[in-house]
Amino acid sequence: MAEVIFLPRNKIIKVKAGTSLLDTSIRARVVIPARCGGKAACLMCKVKVDDPTTLLPLTQSEKTKLSQEQISENIRLACQAKVFNKKVIVSIPESPLNKVVQAQLKNENNNDL
Ligand code: FES
């Protein structure tokens, strides 16, 4: 079993080794954007891991679809990356849409003051 921690919500769940991060997130009720059904096509499920050795090695799809810079920054595709057997810490990037909405709400709140 591995313990997976999803940041920034700090949601913790235990899963069997070999479970994908996307499946783990679904079980943990943590949202990771994904539109291709886990086929490594949409590239929306990018996450960052603290320690890449806590996951099984990059899949061939990840090697071809992620840039060298992304790989060196420990970015993985959640639908492809599988949990190994340690403590896995995963950061889910804030979606660009959320950022726009939050900025708009902040502006509206400032205008109300
Ligand atoms: S879910 Fe589409 S690339 Fe991972």
Image (cartoon, rainbow, N blue to C red):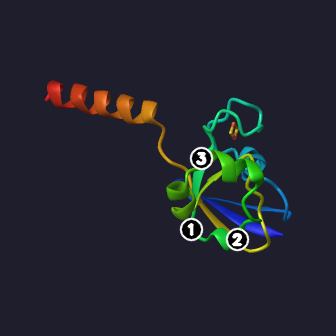
Give the CA distance from mark 1 to mark 2: 9 Å
Give the CA distance from mark 2 to mark 3: 16 Å
**Residue appearing at x 82%, y 56% in the figure:** 19
Left or right side of 88 for 113: left
Residue to which mark 2 is pinned: 54
Which of pointers 2 and 3 lies earlier in the amino acid sequence? 3
- Taking depth in this image into account, of 91 and 73 the one nearest to the observer is 73
Q: Quadrant of residue 89?
A: bottom right
Mark sitting on residue 50: 1
Q: Identify which amino acid the numbered label 1 is placed on.
A: Asp
- Tell me the SS state at disc 2: helix
Residue to which mark 3 is pinned: 46
Rendered view: 108 above or below 80: above
Give the CA distance from mark 1 to mark 3: 13 Å
Mark 1 and mark 2 residues within 8 Å of each other at the beta carbon = yes
Q: Identify which amino acid the numbered label 3 is placed on.
A: Lys
Where is residue 45 shown, x and y percent of the image?
A: 63, 42
